[in-house]
Image: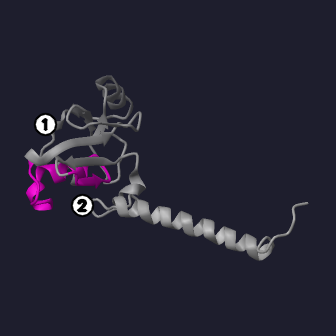
Amino acid sequence: MLPRTPGSGYAGQMVSCLLVLMLAAAAFAGDDAKGPDARREKCPVCGMFVSLFADWNATIVFTDSTRAVFDGSKDMFKYVLELKTYNAAQSSDTIKTIVVKDYVSKKETNALTAFYVIWSDIYGPMGNEPIPFEKEADAKRFLQEHHGKKILNFRDITPELLYALDNPG
């Protein structure tokens, strides 16, 4: 049996437990101060919490290290195509990277080289989404299995297409 020292009883254990909790809270607050809290981050286009759709997220990073995170690729395209409307401080020249989540692997992939399946029977956070794939073979397989209509490249996504995806019929 260990010798009793002042504060080693129940009260001492409570103080130790509270100290651990306070240190953990301080560490968490320090992380919050370093950057945005992803759990509270909202899509700048629709206002939805992006953490609810982690497998669908898309991200734009600008040359000044600011970023915009989206619940899905459709809102990312709306943002890029109407950048001055959503973020007048940026331009297409200040975009450093754009990444989307590959539908198969759920890993980030370059949005500019990805393949997008439209009009499938799979819906994303905003309904009909251009569903991104890193590999064309995966996009072709998905197109067949999920009754997609077409595979597009980044440059093929237009405001008219996005409108049609939002307003089918």
Residue 81 place in picture, x, y as percent = 12, 50
Q: Which mark is residue 73?
A: none
Q: Residue 21 versus residue 15: which sits nearer the camera?
A: 15
Identify the residue at image location x=26%, y=62%: 46
How dense is the environment of label 1, judged by Cα within 10 Å: few (below 14), some, or many (20 and up)?
A: few
Q: Name above or below for residue 88 compared with residue 56.
A: below
Image spot of residue 29 (x, y percent): 44, 66
Magenta extent: 65-92
Identify which amino acid the numbered label 1 is placed on: Arg
Crowding at dot 2, Cα within 10 Å, few <14 / some 14-19 / many 20+, comes out as: some
The residue positioned 36% from the left and 31% from the top of the image is 142
- The residue that label 1 is drawn on is 155
Q: Is residue 146 magenta?
A: no
Helix, strand or loop status at disc 1: helix
Q: Are marks 2 and 1 in contact (CB under 8 Å)?
A: no
Q: Nearer the viewer, residue 151 or 19?
A: 19
Numbered disc 2: secondary structure: loop
Horizontal side, residue 13 vs residue 81: left or right: right
Q: Is residue 68 magenta?
A: yes
Q: Is residue 16 left or right of residue 35?
A: right
The numbered disc on residue 44 is 2
In the rendered image of this protein, does residue 72 appear above or below residue 24? above
Choose top left, top right, bottom left or bottom right for residue 157: top left
Name the amino acid type tagged 2: Pro
